[in-house]
Image (tube, helix red, strand yellow):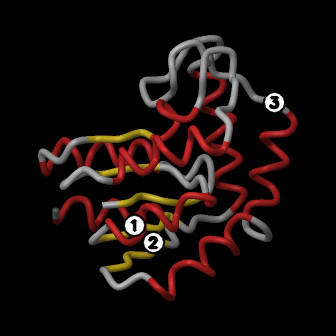
């Protein structure tokens, strides 16, 4: 299972709950991508890591990292797309930043304490117009089950039935 959506949509929370209910191994991509101090890996290193992570037989994985969807989609049976409004995602990242201020979230890499940077806010504001379009362009080739939730209550209802 692959959980995708805007930052602040609840991907990590949803993936963790799916893993808890199903017993599937949980992979938070943020834990694997970021290096201490918010350092990004080079493209080749990240592609190798992604191939190794996606090669597992069973998993629930959360994260976008659009440049690697081509490595993950063929391995996924189900894609859960949390396609929530921007204003909700912005509110959630602000709440998350206050709640975890200066601490490392469980779904994040060690050495990357929570912060609310202007470039990240801008990324969320632009997500629907830019990053979301990359997701949309990859999904027509996906042959598994696509579950697209436009409201949190839809996702909660599905999860309750899982």
* Residue highlighted by disc 2: 149
Report the mark closest to the observer, 2 or 1. Answer: 1
In the rendered structure, the answer to whether residue 88 lies left or right of residue 30 reads: right
- In this rendering, is residue 141 above or below 96? below
Q: Residue at x 57, y 38 (%)?
A: 45
Which image quarter holds the N terminus? bottom left
Q: Residue at x 74, y 61 (%)?
A: 127
Q: Are marks 2 and 1 in contact (CB under 8 Å)?
A: yes
Q: Secondary structure at mark 1?
A: strand
Report the mark closest to the observer, 2 or 3. Answer: 3
- In this rendering, is residue 26 above or below 36? below
**Disc assigned to residue 117:** 3
Q: Count residues near mark 2 (Cα–Cα under 10 Å), then give few for <14, some for 14-19, many for 20+.
A: some
| Mark found first going from the N terminus, 2 or 3 | 3
Q: Position of residue 36 (x, y in %)?
A: 61, 15
Which image quarter holds the C terminus? bottom left
In the rendered structure, the answer to whether residue 150 lies left or right of residue 156 reads: right
How many angstroms separate mark 2 from mark 1 (CA)? Answer: 8 Å
Q: Secondary structure at mark 2?
A: strand
Q: Residue at x 42, y 58 (%)?
A: 3
Q: Secondary structure at mark 3?
A: loop
| Mark found first going from the N terminus, 2 or 1 | 1
**Residue 21 or 66: which is nearer the viewer?**
66
* Residue highlighted by disc 1: 80
Q: Are marks 2 and 3 in contact (CB under 8 Å)?
A: no
Q: Residue at x 37, y 72 (%)?
A: 74
How many angstroms separate mark 2 from mark 3 (CA)? Answer: 27 Å
How many angstroms separate mark 3 from mark 1 (CA)? Answer: 27 Å
| Mark found first going from the N terminus, 3 or 1 | 1
**Disc assigned to residue 95:** none
**Residue 96 or 115: which is nearer the viewer?**
115
């Amino acid at each position: 299972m692959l959980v995708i959506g805007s930052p602040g949509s609840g991907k990590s929370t949803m993936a963790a709950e799916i893993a808890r209910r199903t017993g599937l191994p949980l992979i938070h991509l943020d834990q694997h991508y970021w290096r201490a101090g918010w350092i990004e890996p080079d493209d080749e290193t990240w592609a190798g890591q992604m191939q190794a992570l996606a090669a597992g037989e069973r998993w629930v994985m959360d994260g976008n990292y659009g440049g690697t969807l081509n490595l993950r989609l063929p391995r996924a049976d189900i894609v859960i797309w949390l396609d929530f409004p921007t204003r909700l995602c912005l509110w959630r990242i602000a709440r998350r930043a206050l709640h975890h201020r200066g601490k490392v979230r469980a779904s994040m890499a060690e050495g990357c304490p929570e912060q609310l940077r202007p470039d990240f806010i801008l990324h969320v504001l632009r997500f629907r117009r830019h990053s979301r379009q990359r997701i949309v362009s990859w999904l027509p080739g996906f042959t598994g089950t696509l579950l697209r939730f436009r409201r949190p209550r839809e996702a909660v209802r599905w999860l309750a039935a899982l």
